[in-house]
Image: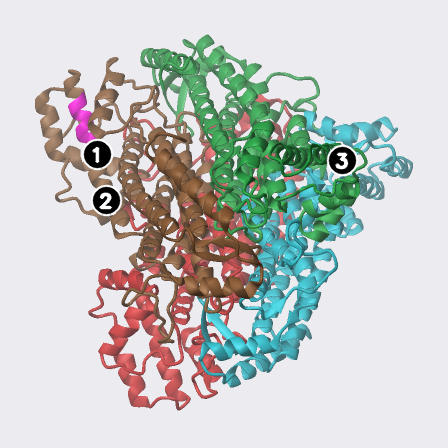
Chain colours: A cyan, B green, C brown, D red
Amino acid sequence: MTSLLRARPAASAAMLAAFGDAALVDAALWFEAALARAEAAEGLISADVADAIARACTSDGIDIAALAEAGAHAGTLAIPLVALLRQRGAARLHLGATSQDLADTALMLQAKRGVALITHDLKALADAAASLAGAHAGTKMLGRTLLQGALPITFGLKAANWALGIDAALARLEREAAAALVLQCGGAAGTLAGLHGRGFAVAERMAAELGLACPPMPWQARRDGIAGLAAALAIVTGAAGKIARDVSLLAQGEVAEAFEPRVAGRGGSSAMAHKRNPTGCQVALSAALRTPGLAATIFAAMPQEHERGLGGWQAEAPVLAELFCLAHGAVLAMRGVVEGLDVDPQAMAANLDAAGVGGDTGESEALLARALAARGLANRGVGT
Amino acid sequence: MTSLLRARPAASAAMLAAFGDAALVDAALWFEAALARAEAAEGLISADVADAIARACTSDGIDIAALAEAGAHAGTLAIPLVALLRQRGAARLHLGATSQDLADTALMLQAKRGVALITHDLKALADAAASLAGAHAGTKMLGRTLLQGALPITFGLKAANWALGIDAALARLEREAAAALVLQCGGAAGTLAGLHGRGFAVAERMAAELGLACPPMPWQARRDGIAGLAAALAIVTGAAGKIARDVSLLAQGEVAEAFEPRVAGRGGSSAMAHKRNPTGCQVALSAALRTPGLAATIFAAMPQEHERGLGGWQAEAPVLAELFCLAHGAVLAMRGVVEGLDVDPQAMAANLDAAGVGGDTGESEALLARALAARGLANRGVGT
Amino acid sequence: MTSLLRARPAASAAMLAAFGDAALVDAALWFEAALARAEAAEGLISADVADAIARACTSDGIDIAALAEAGAHAGTLAIPLVALLRQRGAARLHLGATSQDLADTALMLQAKRGVALITHDLKALADAAASLAGAHAGTKMLGRTLLQGALPITFGLKAANWALGIDAALARLEREAAAALVLQCGGAAGTLAGLHGRGFAVAERMAAELGLACPPMPWQARRDGIAGLAAALAIVTGAAGKIARDVSLLAQGEVAEAFEPRVAGRGGSSAMAHKRNPTGCQVALSAALRTPGLAATIFAAMPQEHERGLGGWQAEAPVLAELFCLAHGAVLAMRGVVEGLDVDPQAMAANLDAAGVGGDTGESEALLARALAARGLANRGVGT
Amino acid sequence: MTSLLRARPAASAAMLAAFGDAALVDAALWFEAALARAEAAEGLISADVADAIARACTSDGIDIAALAEAGAHAGTLAIPLVALLRQRGAARLHLGATSQDLADTALMLQAKRGVALITHDLKALADAAASLAGAHAGTKMLGRTLLQGALPITFGLKAANWALGIDAALARLEREAAAALVLQCGGAAGTLAGLHGRGFAVAERMAAELGLACPPMPWQARRDGIAGLAAALAIVTGAAGKIARDVSLLAQGEVAEAFEPRVAGRGGSSAMAHKRNPTGCQVALSAALRTPGLAATIFAAMPQEHERGLGGWQAEAPVLAELFCLAHGAVLAMRGVVEGLDVDPQAMAANLDAAGVGGDTGESEALLARALAARGLANRGVGT
């Protein structure tokens, strides 16, 4: 599916670019150039040949639509791309590599950019939630359980729960990124054959240039890293979705305790001028519906056949790209919502009063103080 | 995710077009023009106004990228699109309608095209499998259960099983399409208000023009039709995937009983010139991994809030589009594989002989004859 | 997972029994006895032998725990069960059949009972919603879109939407049950071999006795019927979940427009005596979260290997059983909720008034009348 | 679903017990007793009262079936269980706690046992694969990509890939268990109210007794820990499923390079005496089909409402239990398969020879040596 009109509302422009065709071609070209440089450094090809390959590895003159047709026909992107580059005089390009090496490594290069985009906004989202928590440490409201009024809490406590949820999702994403952002370069059967015993040295040089880790063994038939990353992205989205659920419920007309920020032209209705729709929450809730099935797809693809599977790894790349788009879309939307959240403490007080469940929030305040302190320590690397 | 390089291998060019941005804009414009014509016919607006609206409803001059940005900002595509068309002088456009009316009806118009594409190739795939079954009614081979040799069967029986699976998937798709391809036009709160009591008559006229059914009540908060369609598409893909599983296993070098047709430039390897990869099976198996999670997403979105949900229906459209792309990609790939399947009866006989489980296939032949006869009767509308 | 404490809240006692161990053993024994009777009728075994088999096919003295251990060790339930029955003197039992024949047919016998339980309560749920719709044809309330107040509707219209959603889910379930509730009896390689050419006649007799349809060809490697049934169950659950979403939102303290019926001992809190939790909605919403992934599992299992797969069909049976349990749990819970729904028209009027969006609901009333009329016609088989 | 006959083949007896009703009741009783002891230590209740509570907290005389009915009626297990224990004279039991505290903490106590069972067998499985790798460092075989013969590898390299996949899955499970195995005790609205400011101290004491971590803030509305654990279990199962895929393909009659160990009574056929079915692989592949949808369910449940959700957390517990059962079933099955794998180096050599792709595996051997060395270092905590 390539509709920008349907993809853009759920994603960010930056992430669409990170996983767009131009970025994919650039990553593929970098893979080939880095391979050539590493092979030259290991004496497998001459420096001149490597230079010629590097010069061929430019996206100038590459027709994406034609390349897409050719890749679909051939069965892999690498086949027509390598053929095209060789026609430019880079005959020894792709030496010792295979299609999946290019596909997986390019995906990891894009994923690295994707992780950076998400972590940046996740941190800001967590900090915005923590700031709200601090600012509303004493703002009393009705705690609600099973969608029924329960007992008093503070809005600060609710916001702190959001912050801790995002903190945990961020920590997992960083852990999984560290495990997953790894070079794949194994050659035809994943043995690093064909490089006169210098295959591993070539891989180490490539990994260093590309900014990826170098695995003890190629991972073309070992997909847990991608699966862990997919899970982390689904959980990031779920943590953003949790905030969206709360805000959208608080913004109901009869509750009216908190609202998305007013942004000109956002959240209107094509039929009703008076509407102020929770559009950021809509983005995040929609993403939280879509990411679980995508992560499940990547888990389901794990039992791939022998040294390189049939269908499994081909399924992963577009699905992982979608996960990045949805996760960032959700995080960015909720960052905007939380940073500008329009809180009405008087409405909170009135609803709490109407519920008739008392108003003592001493424990909430103590609990919040402890949670924020723990968060501060953790973020400074002191605690856990 | 909008990468053509990652989307195209799994889809068909025709289905990518059917769910592309241009097709979406065309469907949305048709919705608005049909609405205006129906309103004029019911005396709600003048014929001149309707003509002016129809003239405004052209995709000429619509900048997809700008529209995508504006739609993402506003929260729905309809808001900037309607604004743009009104700027063209079509002030009374969209009268009595709301964003989701446009979104859902446009999706159904695209889905109608999608169903037509898939049914066309599904029928051809089923017929190709049935032809294989007829041609190999007496071709003995080893039946395999739990991936172990079992007893003799005929290749005809195996191919007939493929045909029946596709027949059943096609019948379900047609049933679900009949239930789902329905106009959505309910206005702001789904009540058909704002049209002076002529709302239902307007809807009936629109449905007739657009070639969709007219529901007894708008369905913006009743999503079973979309869910049924999603399920049918996932099952279509699974039935194609079943054939792909069998062919890919038969094509293993040690089995070597059947192969995808030789197509120049298809199924090669970027590293090994001797490879003949089962690329069609790869497409179908990859699709069969991806569709289950997408269908699950649409099921999960069903419990939408009140008269129009938040996040649920926004999640459905891109996911349904993806399901159409993957289902058609799988069907088309396997149509090519089955139509040109390269069967080696001698290898089948040799493997059967080596298994030492006898060679009587009388019952297989009788069973096949009965199945093909039943299929023929069903296809002529005589039996079930 | 076999915890009754965790399974029962989500299921009904009747459905747990329908898919319990005793029911499974009974179904398996019926399969074997019916096979023997059919074989005797076709002259394959003597009437005396068939009688002896039928006498052996009693659950008396079958130790479920021991059978479960033995089945897990052997890899199929049929192996130890058949061995046990043969020890009882039924030496020729299971003639021409194989493990999956017993497993699939027993599952379909259980599914038939499951479908009957669900359709019974689905009809009652739809009727209860339609009754509510009729009773509240003129009850004005605030229509809500994207969780924000929109325009006036009637509560009757909302309830009619529930009824139509359940009607559609019921129709699909009946369609899919008709396609899926089919005998499986194909023997070792699915060819009906080993019965001297009488295999199909035996199958027809068995199907008649067991109350299942007889397929043109055994379906052990063609799983679309089970997949269609799984989809129908997930959609039933989603339609029930839609009602639960609405009721739980209406029951919020600040909205207070409708509540689950008061039932002694239901919906309390272990910590707060004042709580009246929407427990029926909780059951249905929980089920609607769980069924999508289960249906996806069954779709994912479709590409099974050759004449009988490895892992796929073994995954389906427990998952389909879970789908039946969850679907019925949700339907039964919402039947109770809708039949006894505690509606507060005054609160509806007050919230509508407070929203300041007017109060004309003429179109809602006309639309409702049309929808209920269409429903009545459809239920009498007149319309669609 | 509570059928032992359908649950047992996919699970282990030990894990079924760990998540059985008796274990759940024991965990719930321990929660209550530990709460009372912690409250006594903090001076909230007397030591005598705590002793009386602890004496009441015995499973003697608890009727599971009746408790399941009562819990289903009430909406939570805690309500009837607490009522029953109070009838035993433990009037002040459950002070400051709520239903979800008991439910979540009991689930975590069961999960802790589940993690221990899985990690034990995962380590053994990884070691068995590594031993195979060492033993077959020089065993040449055909490397296969896209289900086609590619180039020579060693069987040692294939087995090392299995070992690294299991190692990584184990490391993730341990990370996620550390993050998830946390006490939940927050009281009615998750504020630790009602304990005179001693709530956090009580929680710390409880956590210490129960062997769980104590969170900075209760997590009843923050479900990332459970989601991370679910993901880790799905990935464990996928890593086991990868081995199962390879073994089942190698065991095909035409390939015949490796087989599951012969175990009396395992892998037979109810119809064909000559069959040796890969039953362990069947268990693992079936589990790998089922876990993705279950993990997706838990991701989908994350956006829970306010301070305690409706339907979400109720969905998680049975699903997480199922994930533990399936993951352990898969791991245990593949541990048996890999520990006793019946490898045929001559068949490997013959198939490699027949493929005509040469036989040099020097790089494979070097790569394997490096991978095993890295694994050894990692396991000794030296490297990564």
Left/right placement of residue C314 relative to residue A361 reads left
- In percent of width and height, residue B343 lies at 52, 13
Q: Which of C156 and B256 is in front in this view?
A: C156
> Is residue D264 in view from this perspective?
no
- The secondary structure type at the circle numbered 1 is helix
Could you classify mark 2 by the number of other residues whose Cα lies within 10 Å: few (under 14), some (14-19), or many (20 or more)? Answer: many
Rendered residue at 35%/60% (across/down): D18
Q: Is residue D342 magenta?
A: no
Specify whether disc 3 shares its chain with disc 1: no
* Chain letter for the residue marked with disc 1 in the picture: C
Question: Disc 3 designates what residue?
Answer: B56
Question: Which residue type does callout 1 highlight?
Answer: Val
Q: Nearer the viewer, residue C181 or B129?
A: C181
Q: Does the magenta stretch include residue C35?
A: yes
Question: Disc 2 designates what residue?
Answer: C67
Rendered residue at 40%/42% (across/down): C372
Question: Which residue type does callout 3 highlight?
Answer: Ala
Left/right placement of residue A286 relative to residue C294 reads right
Residues at marks 3 and 1 touching, judged by CB atoms closer than 8 Å = no
Quick check: B368 above or below A188?
above
> Disc 3 versus disc 2: distance between alpha carbons?
73 Å
Which stretch did the figure color magenta?
C29-38
- The secondary structure type at the circle numbered 2 is helix
Question: Disc 1 designates what residue?
Answer: C82
